[in-house]
Amino acid sequence: MNEQFTRLLAEHTFKGREYSFTHADVVLYHPGHYMELNEQIVALYQQEGFEKIMIPKVFNKFLGEEEYAYHKELLSEMGIPEEIILPIEGEAASANEIIEHAMSHLAETSAKKVLLAGKTFFMKRFLLIATAFAKEDMVLDVLPLVDKRGLNKENWHETEQGKKRVFHEFQMIAQFLSKYQSKG
């Protein structure tokens, strides 16, 4: 692949943390079936703390159960208080819809500092969709988490799996923008 093309795709997919705040009111956590991401969430809790963490309450075929139930148990065993681990409710067919549900819920709360935590290649889409539904007084930031595949801004183009993930992000962003535009 052309180096400039690779760099442009990476710039439009990956996003680092800006440290707009510490000690988030809410962490929206999208772990999927990657349990190794939990270690990074626990490190965040130990270093900065946060008031609440929300996990999608959707069935994950790779886990064989709901992400919320699965990760809540692991996170509480690893030291995060069970009472601050909450589900993201609502029927959702995609991560895009999960983000919309979560932000719609948070719009009805006093949450101001929202940290979006998920896989490295998911950060720009996560932030784009979350900001589309955020209240004016919310400050959002991202926490990119590295899963066992190790995909990041510098190496994603070196494997077919990495290329597939990045190209998929563009498809999902286009899908969101099309739906968002049609809502008017």
Image (spheres, rainbow, N blue to C red):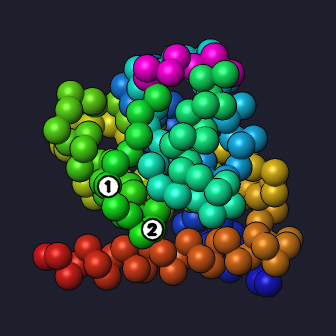
Q: For label 2, count other residues whose C-alpha is less than 10 Å away and answer few (under 14), some (14-19) or many (20+).
A: few
**x then y, percent, for residue 123:** 54, 54
Image point 52% across, 17% down: which residue? 81
- In the rendered image of this protein, does residue 148 appear above or below residue 29? below
Q: 65 or 79: nearer the eye?
A: 65
Please tell me whether residue 156 belongs to the stretch shown in magenta. no
Q: 90 or 104: nearer the eye?
A: 90
Q: Which residue is mark 1?
A: 90
Q: Toward which corner of the image does residue 176 lie, by quadrant?
A: bottom left
**x then y, percent, for residue 142:** 51, 43
Q: Are marks 1 and 2 in contact (CB under 8 Å)?
A: no
| Disc 2, SS | loop
- In the rendered image of this protein, does residue 14 appear above or below residue 108? below
Q: 15 or 77: nearer the eye?
A: 77
Image point 78% across, 73% down: which residue? 161
Magenta region, residue range:
78-84
Q: For label 1, count other residues whose C-alpha is less than 10 Å away and answer few (under 14), some (14-19) or many (20+).
A: some
The label number, if any, that marks residue 94 in the structure image: 2
Image point 68% across, 21% down: which residue? 78
* Image quarter of the C terminus: bottom left
* Image quarter of the N terminus: bottom right
- Given the current orientation, which residue lies at the most extreme left position? 184
| Left or right: where 67 falls relative to 89 | right
Q: Amino acid at mark 1?
A: Gly
Image point 63% across, 16% down: which residue? 79
| Left or right: where 6 falls relative to 138 | right
| Left or right: where 51 falls relative to 145 | left
